[in-house]
Image (cartoon, rainbow, N blue to C red):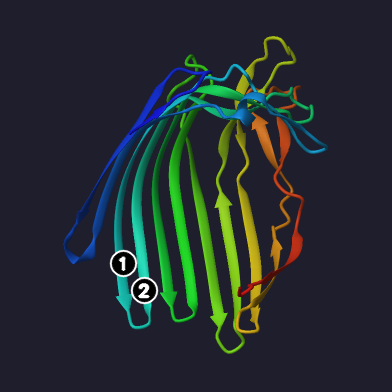
Amino acid sequence: MRLLNSNLFDQEIAYSVSAKYILPKGYELRAVYGMSPRLPNYEELYSYYFDANHDIQGNENLTTEKGRSAFLHLKKRFEFNEGSYTNRLSLSLFEVEDRIDLVVASAPGDPLVYRYLNVDTYKNRNISYMGNFRYKNFDAGFGITYGATLKTLNQSEDTNDYLYSMNLNFNVSYKIEKTNTTASLLFKYTGPEYEYVQTGTDIINPTYTRGKRQEISWVDATVRQGFYNNKLDVTVGVRNLFDVTRIRTSSEGAGAHTAGANTLLMGYGRSYFVKLLYKLSI
C-alpha cells in the first residue's frame, strides 16, 4: 500500500495483493489484484513538442487516472538434457477511469496534432501465452496475446463496442562458440488499436470520433562479435527491416465527401547501425 500526495491533485491510495500456489508436477499458479491511481506527469500537463514530424501538446486540465487490474498466471518449466522450455499462460483485466491518452486533435486532412485528454472509460481483457526454448547455443522466444479493448471518450458513447486484436512477438538467437559470434532476429506484430480523431474544425469546442489505427509489423536483426576475450563487442544490425514509415489512422465518422483517413509517422524507414562496446578492467 502506498499514499500519493500532490499539491495539484487530491490525495490518493494505491494497494495490491498477490498469492502464489505450487501445484503438483511443478506447476505454479499466481494471482494478483490491485487498485492504483496515476497522477498526470509534467509532460502530459505542460509539454509542447513540435518539429517537422511531431506536434504533441500537453493539457493542464487533466485529472487523475483511477484504475484496477487483475492477473492470473499459470507457469511450468520443463528441463531436459542441455536445454529447457518455460511456458506461461496468463489472463488479465484492466479497467481505468479517466485514462490519460494521446488524442488526434487536428481536423481531417490537416497535419497530425496530438493532445493529452482524459478518456472516460478504458477496459482491456487479455489472454496470452509466452514460451521460451533453450538448447545449447540456441535460444528462441514466442508470445501471443489476444485481447479485447474498449475505449470511450464520453460516457454517452456505445459501451459495448470492443475492438478485438492480436499481438505477436518472436525472437531467436544462436551463438557460434568457435568464433564467439551471436546472431539475433526480433519480430513484433501489433494489431489495430482504437484512437480518437478530431472530426470538426471548431477549435473552441472540438468534436472527436473514435477511429482505428492500422496494424504494424516490425523486424530487427543483429550480429554481435566478441574480441579480445569479450573485452570488445562489435554489433552490426538493421532496424525496421520491413521499411515501415507511416501507417493509416482513420476516423469512423468520415463521410463520402470528407477526409476520414490520415497517416501516422511510426519510423524513418530501414536503418543500419554499428555499435562498439569496450569493457574496462580497473
Amino acid marked by disc 1: Arg
Cβ–Cβ below 8 Å for labels 2 and 1?
yes
Q: Which label number is shown at residue 186? A: none
Give the SS element for disc 2.
strand
The residue under label 1 is: 77
User: Residue at the spot x=64%, y=73% of the render?
Assistant: 280
Give the SS element for disc 1.
strand
Q: Would residue 89 be found to the left or right of residue 262 on screen?
A: left
Q: Which label number is shown at residue 84? A: 2
Q: Would residue 94 be found to the left or right of residue 228 on screen?
A: left
User: Residue 117, image x and y in percent?
Assistant: 59, 23
Q: Residue furthest top?
A: 204
Q: Would residue 115 be found to the left or right of residue 101 on screen?
A: right
User: Residue 63, image x and y in percent?
Assistant: 52, 19
Where 83 falls versus 123 (above or below)?
below
User: Residue 99, image x and y in percent?
Assistant: 50, 27
Q: Would residue 72 be found to the left or right of residue 245 on screen?
A: left
User: Residue at the spot x=25%, y=57% of the render?
Assistant: 28
| Front-most of residues 212 and 231 | 231
Image quadrant occupied by the N terminus: top left
| Front-most of residues 217 and 32 | 32
Query: CA separation, marks 2 and 1?
Result: 7 Å
Image quadrant occupied by the C terminus: bottom right
Where residue 69 sits, quadrant-wise, is top left
Q: Residue furthest right?
A: 52
Where 78 falls versus 143 (above or below)?
below
Q: Residue furthest front?
A: 282
